[in-house]
Amino acid sequence: MTVQVRSTRISRQTRGHTDILDITGDVKERLGESGFRDGTVTLFVPGATAGVSTIEFEPGLLKDLPAMFDRFAPYERDYEHHKTWGDRNGASHLRAPLIGPSLVVPFIEGELTLGTWQQIVLFDFDDHPRHREVVCQIMGI
């Protein structure tokens, strides 16, 4: 057997300000289209103000996570980053590395190995709406 690679993208419009989008369905769709049975899905979001991770995508957590980030890195604060570029998204640049830009999820017999309450999510921390592209690379047999 030879390992093969399929690369695609998941496109989403976001609202910014710690917008959290469930992209699990998009990933499952691309995995199904690949025809692979076993391997890994690697997700990567280009840019320094977004991240990809897994969470339990439920209403309480969708409020708790932004509140946590607001305590850690409020958007209203003045950051040194603002002086460098003349913009106002310093908080976005502090939040994104905490989540990280990439995620790897194994799949077995064509199914992602996510836990029962685990979904794949895109975080957009920028201070304005954005069009985001998540690179989805599937390696498998």
Image (cartoon, rainbow, N blue to C red):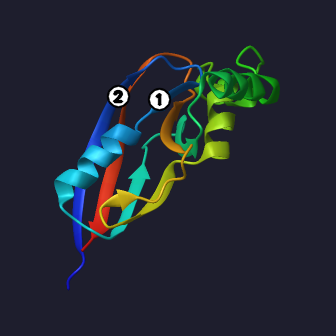
Nearest the viewer among 114 and 93 is: 114
Residue at the far right: name it.
71
At mark 2, the secondary structure is strand
Q: Position of residue 77 (x, y in %)?
A: 78, 18
Q: Position of residue 31 (x, y in %)?
A: 27, 54
Callouts 2 and 1 close, C-beta under 8 Å: yes
Judged left or right of residue 67, residue 122 is left
In the picture of the structure, the residue carrying the numbered disc 1 is 21
For image coordinates 45% across by 33% down, the residue present is: 22
Q: Quadrant of residue 46?
A: top left
In the picture of the structure, the residue carrying the numbered disc 2 is 12
Look at the picture and state if 133 lies above or below 19: below
Look at the picture and state if 139 lies above or below 30: below
For image coordinates 25% across by 48% down, the residue present is: 30
Judged left or right of residue 55, residue 30 is left
Q: How many marks?
A: 2
Q: Which numbered mark, 2 or 1, is in the foreground of this view?
A: 1
Look at the picture and state if 23 lies above or below 3: above
Judged left or right of residue 95, residue 74 is right
Q: Quadrant of residue 13?
A: top left
Mark seen at residue 33:
none
Q: Quadrant of the N terminus?
A: bottom left
Residue at the far front: name it.
116
At mark 1, the secondary structure is strand
Q: Residues within 10 Å of mark 1 (few under 14, many from 20)?
A: some
Judged left or right of residue 26, residue 78 is right
Q: Amino acid at mark 2?
A: Arg
